[in-house]
Image: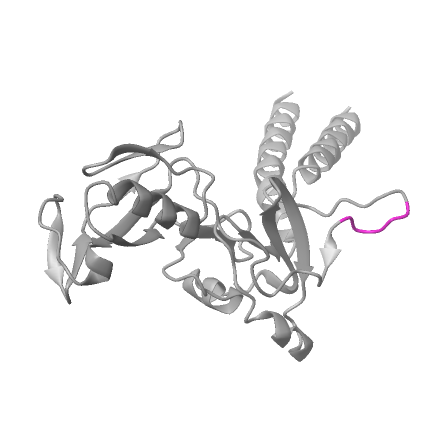
């Protein structure tokens, strides 16, 4: 009878271990998908080094703009939040683009800006403000552009603001804390929206050959994903130890009961 009980609990332990192993490294994201020929479906080392199209303003973007008249020679006093600096008027407030694509701006009110490039937005505002001011000079910037960086520590991620339009891949990784010890420098994915769809590019920064990619200009809303190294033994151990403890306790109780008989 003792042998049958031990055999039963041994089978239970093995079955539990097999079920737990199915969840090992389940927090890993963006695993490679291979086609019928066994090839990876994303583009390897084909990512463009520079933006192929201008950024277009979208809903929830925050924009700031500077405004001056007579091509920047006269200061505007009427707009709220404006201060004098080097003969150019500056708005210290950011304005959020609503879901309908409009943004409410001083003096001119609601203006449709979603879908416009920065240059197109500036031209639109010049046209609007020219009805109120002589020869307006306007510069627009989007203040909440960012990329999301997964540095190789499982599903942990960092949101990195793009403080300038020429932020490189190396700078974005550095701001996120660099590639972690668990990260695989030879398996980095850049996920970028191209024509409304996410396109995935693969990079290898583990050798000097990858140096040509470190100065690549990242774009707003890029996802930079450093694949983590699988920690199979560690995760199985953390899942199985409680089960072993429970089974050992059960076997001890059964042995104690048998001794009392």
Residue drawn at (73%, 48%) of the image = 32
The quadrant in which residue 249 appears is: top right
Query: Percent position (x, y) of residue 178?
Result: 48, 65
Q: Is residue 163 left or right of residue 35?
A: left
Give the colour scheme of this rendering. one colour
As drawn, 120 above or below 171: above
Q: In the rendered image, which quarter contains the C terminus?
A: top right
Residue drawn at (24%, 53%) of the image = 135
- Range of magenta residues: 37-41
Furthest residue in direction right, as rendered: 37
Q: Nearer the viewer, residue 83 or 226?
A: 83
Q: Nearer the viewer, residue 148 or 222?
A: 222
The quadrant in which residue 2 appears is: top right
Q: In the rendered image, which quarter contains the N terminus?
A: top right
For the question of whether residue 123 can be seen, the reply is yes
Q: Nearer the viewer, residue 23 or 58?
A: 58
Query: Percent position (x, y) of residue 211?
Result: 61, 76
Residue 43 belongs to the span the image colors magenta:
no
């Amino acid at each position: 009878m003792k042998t049958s009980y031990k055999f039963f609990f041994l089978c239970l332990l093995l079955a539990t271990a097999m079920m737990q192993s199915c969840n090992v490294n389940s927090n890993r994201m963006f695993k490679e998908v291979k086609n019928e020929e066994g090839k990876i479906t994303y583009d390897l080392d084909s990512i463009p080094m520079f933006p192929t199209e201008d950024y277009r303003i979208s809903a929830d973007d925050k924009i700031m703009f500077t405004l001056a008249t007579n091509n920047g020679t006269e200061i505007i006093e009427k707009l709220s939040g404006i201060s004098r600096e080097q003969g150019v008027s500056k708005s210290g407030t950011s304005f959020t683009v609503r879901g309908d694509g409009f943004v409410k701006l001083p003096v001119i009110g609601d203006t449709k800006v979603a879908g416009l490039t920065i240059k197109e937005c500036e031209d639109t505002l010049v046209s609007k403000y020219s009805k109120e001011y002589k020869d307006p000079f306007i510069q627009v910037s989007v203040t909440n552009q960012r990329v999301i960086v997964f540095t190789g520590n499982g599903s942990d991620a960092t949101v990195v603001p793009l403080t300038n339009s020429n932020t490189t891949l190396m700078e974005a990784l550095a701001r996120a804390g660099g590639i972690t010890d668990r990260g695989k420098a030879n398996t980095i994915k850049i996920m970028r929206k191209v024509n409304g769809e996410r396109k995935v590019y693969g990079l290898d920064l583990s050798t000097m050959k990858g140096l040509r990619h470190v100065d690549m200009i990242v774009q707003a809303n890029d996802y930079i994903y450093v694949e983590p190294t699988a920690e199979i033994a560690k995760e199985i151990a953390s899942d199985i130890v409680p089960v072993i403890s429970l089974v050992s306790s059960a076997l001890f109780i059964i042995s104690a009961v048998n001794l009392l008989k």
